[in-house]
Amino acid sequence: MSKQMTAAEAIGQIEDGMTIGIGGWGPRRKPMALVREILRSDLKDLTVVAYGGADVGMLCAAGKVKKVVFAFVSLDFIPLEPYFRQARQSGAIEVMEVDEGMMLLGLRAASWGVPFIPTEVGLGTDIITKNADLKVIDSPYDEKEWVAMPALSLDVSLIHADRADARGVCQIAGPDHYMDDWFARAADKTLVSCDELVDSDYFHDPAQARLVHWERSATTGVIAIPGGAHPSSCAPLYGFDVAHFKAYVASAKDEGGIRSYLDKFLGSSEDEYQQNVGGLDAIRAIELPTY
Amino acid sequence: MTAATDYTLAELCIVAASQAFANEGEVLATGIGVIPRLAASLAMKTTNPELMMTDSEAWMLSEPNPLGKRPDDFVPARESWMGFSRIFDNVWSGKRHAMLGPTQIDRFGQSNTSALGGTYDRPKVMMLGARGFPGNSISHPNSFFVPSHNTRVFMEGECDFVSSIGYNPARLPKGHSLDDIDIRLVVTELCVMDFGGPEHQVRLVSLHPGVTVEQVEENTGYPVHVPGDVPVTVAPSQVQLDIIATLDPHNQRAHQIKDNPPGNRG
């Protein structure tokens, strides 16, 4: 059965008020084409769970977000995400701030169908004092107290993969799949954009199959969008677009703010967006970062 | 080893900070930022070859990578995959020592990387977020590097947002002891400190050449325990300087401390 769909069909499955998980990490392998499709929609009041970068910043700036569940929002080489900052500093969004590892535990709890996972992470910090809903519990086995990290159940996850087949076998060929396997499992629906749509026999090679990090049953939709992670990276195919991110960050200081950025780049479709940023060949030519 | 006479303050800080990793045995050394990363790398090349290190992306290395752009034919000495999800397995096992640079460090050794000023719902300045600080601080030893020692970083009162647990009795979790918390070195451009004073008070360990106790006290927003005899921070040896130069061929270290001053300001 083919799970192929268009970006519009994918985003059409999201409703106002839903909780959306977004894969990737900071400026790395974000499903930006799907995020842009949200920016083109009327969706609002979303709760976003992410290891955040410009995905979170853009959605906040465009008024799509009610609440962000985060451990950080950063472009890494530019430490502070300008529009997330504005949203926090103006009090425009609610937040649930957690530790990076706590977010992983929350996704695992949701994936496994347990209400929480105990951890000592967060004890002694403002993670437990600023989150009214986060419970600290006694252990039935020792005399210590533990943080009960709740399941972060997601209505929809958005992920970008290097390759996928039409049945939803998704490959992340870059060095790290981050927590995307857990985002895929924690969601009712997982929508995966991919740089290349491949035939299923592509995965007959064990070296390729080894880079598949969740079963196809966890994939709901496959959307072929070459270059769809831009301006974030999709290693080893392309790096993140430093110049574009700098222009994005600079727009936050302009009078027009996010509107000037979106007017210049977003377009009415991904084709139009890619023309506005120099085309697919230019995206694919972006050098990988050196760490 | 003979001390060099011509070295920068950044190089002095790298050598001083590398001491944090010297006696750690076989743990993952994570230095975030140029000086902490070079400190961990120097330790791995000299005092503690058992250290483990990642390439800051997804591979464990047997040899630290030099910083910045490397030649096309450079082959990193990879020894295993070490993606971000696996980092947490390592963190929670305790086999790690991280050195990071938070925005605020209070008298308890609590640090802040998130909301600054205003209210939590509407901070004056929103920074990164808590990142991995809560988990790091309760799971394994940590050290701090501060390139600008002043009373905004080492501030009066408690951090605006507590990202990492410190020696604060009021926040001590049930069943834990303050001795479970393990903050090691605080290396700044003025001195080296730790929390080895009475009742985990911050303590002066050494002064960088030409820096006075008064300078440290004036630039710290809370009392510093000063032992009777405070040594001068040991100068780098030429061997250490040569290794640092190899690890940092583009001299990124020259841009880490304002005006890149010499190590001896006497």
Image (cartoon, rainbow, N blue to C red):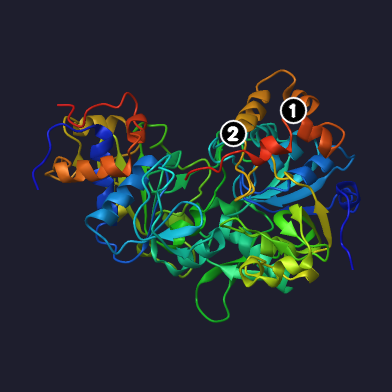
Drawn side of residue B78 relative to residue B195, left or right: right
Q: Give percent across and percent down for residue B266.
A: 14, 26
| Total numbered labels placed on residues in the image | 2
Q: Is residue B263 visible?
A: yes
Q: Nearer the viewer, residue A24 or B212?
A: A24
Q: Residue at x 50, y 59 (%)?
A: B135
Q: Residue at x 43, y 39 (%)?
A: B69
Q: Give percent across and percent down for residue B22.
A: 25, 57
Labels 2, 1: front one: 2
Alpha-carbon neighbours of circle 2 within 10 Å: few (<14), some, or many (≥20)? some
Label 2 element class = helix
Q: Identify the amino acid type marked 1.
A: Ile
Q: Identify the amino acid type marked 2.
A: Val
Q: Which residue is mark 2?
A: A242
- Upstream in the sequence, badge 2 or badge 1? 2
Q: Which residue is mark 1?
A: A258
Q: Give percent across and percent down for residue A31.
A: 73, 48
Q: Chain of mark 1?
A: A
Q: Eyeballing the image, is A4 above or below A94? A: below
